[in-house]
Amino acid sequence: MGLILSKTPLQRFRFGTQTPARAGVQVVVETTGGRFEAITGQRTVGERMFAPHSMQYEIDMTVKVTPVDMPVKTRDEKYSFHVNMEIRWYVHNAAEVARLGLDDGPHLITAVVRDNIKELGRCFGIDQTLDFEQSIRQSLTDPNVRVVSNCLWIASVSPEVSLDNAGRTQLARIRDVEGRTAVLDAQHVHDTTQQRYDDEVAKMKAAQEIERIKLKRQFDLEAKRLEEEFEREQQVQREQREEAARRQEMEWKADFERREAQWKADFERREREQQIVWQREDERRQDERERDRTNLFLDAIQRGDAAVLALHLGRHPDDTKEIVHMIINNKAIAEERQAKILADMIDKNLIIGADLDGVSQDLIRVVAGMMSRPNTGVFSLNTTVEVGMDAITAKKSAEISSTGNGVGDTADSVTETSGTGDG
């Protein structure tokens, strides 16, 4: 099927069935003046009635694929390329196709492409198939070449280029020779490079040996210098450590002596404080004992309990005068009761006449009158006092002499008597 799908004569002022629009088809009309115009869609009613159209064409606008398979001479006339390709093309100017009456598009495309490829082929040798193939692709997609007769458009090409048998044989020979030449060249380059490398290695080894000896000498000198410097630093550090140790020892010693003196001072202070506390506590306890003893004596004196006083005097005979004075000085006890207590104590050998120093003569008479003795009648005041004093002293001395037990027996006697006292 050609590019011109239909060709229909047209007459004005006639109504006919309108040809439906088709995809990929362009409508072209020819005017009575010989002009060709492409219209969009189908002609309108007004155009069918009044437009000066004499002919209508339907042009195929779809993409076409045309294969091309052809031999092309190489630069050397003895050999040929074999080109196999597909050309994708389409109509881009339907009015021009109708004007030219171009119905066989593939023939025109093939003719144009063949001429272009033949001209290009003579620019390449048998070893340039890839270059020839790339040149075909670039040439047929050039804007100046891809427009054919101002109505067809080459969209793309996909060429494949190969050699004929003679060309392939010759190319194989050339490449074999080139390969051997390349091997020889490479071997020569390798040998030359190896020799140059060996010479450079020998020079480098000699230079390295010289440099090694030089570096070895420098290293030995530097090592010796560093060793001496290290020894000096070690000596300085040892001396610094020793000096620091001496200073630290002196500081420790001074600190220890200071803390020892502080500890000693603190200990002595705490010891003095503790002694004061103990002394105050002892005084407090002594005061409490003294108050308890005084209260005990006062209570016993109030009750006339000579047994309690006897018990205490048996253990503490030095307190006799104190107890006597407590009895005498106690204003809360009547003189008669005081006299009775003193008389009981004399009867129990707890006190003697010397213990009554400072006692009033009247109280002594009352005491003498209450003592247990034979009836001697009535005496004058002085006689009564003397007789009472003598009786007290005599009885005390006699009982002490007869028992021979001293204060201990007296304490026992007081203890036994305490069970029968007046209370």
Image (cartoon, rainbow, N blue to C red):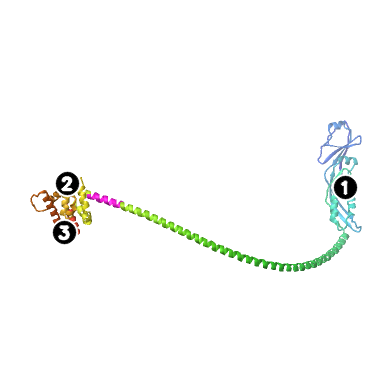
Where is residue 212? Give x, y as percent: 71, 68
Q: Residue furthest front?
A: 382
Where is residue 92? Give x, y as percent: 85, 42
Please tell me which residue lies in front, 222 or 346. Answer: 346
| Numbered badge on residue 109 | 1
Q: Do residues under tags 1 and 2 come within 8 Å of each other at their CB atoms?
A: no
The span picked out in magenta is 284-297
What's the residue type where badge 2 is placed?
Answer: Glu
Asked whether the viewer can see residue 300, the reply is: no
Q: How far apart, in angstroms, are the residues tagged by discs 2 and 3?
A: 28 Å
Mark toward the viewer: 1 or 3: 3
Q: Residues within 10 Å of mark 2 (few under 14, many from 20)?
A: some
| Numbered badge on residue 302 | none
For the stretch drawn in magenta, the main secondary structure is: helix
Residue identified by numbered label 3: 400
Where is residue 286? Give x, y as percent: 29, 52
Secondary structure under tag 1 reads helix
Q: Is residue 55 above or below residue 246?
A: above
Q: How far apart, in angstroms, are the residues tagged by discs 1 and 2?
A: 176 Å
Task: Specify whether 198 is left or right of 71.
Answer: left
Q: Is residue 188 above or below residue 107?
A: below
Q: Do residues under tags 1 and 3 come within 8 Å of each other at their CB atoms?
A: no
What's the residue type where badge 1 is placed?
Answer: Ile
Q: Do residues under tags 2 and 3 come within 8 Å of each other at their CB atoms?
A: no
Where is residue 58? Give x, y as percent: 85, 39
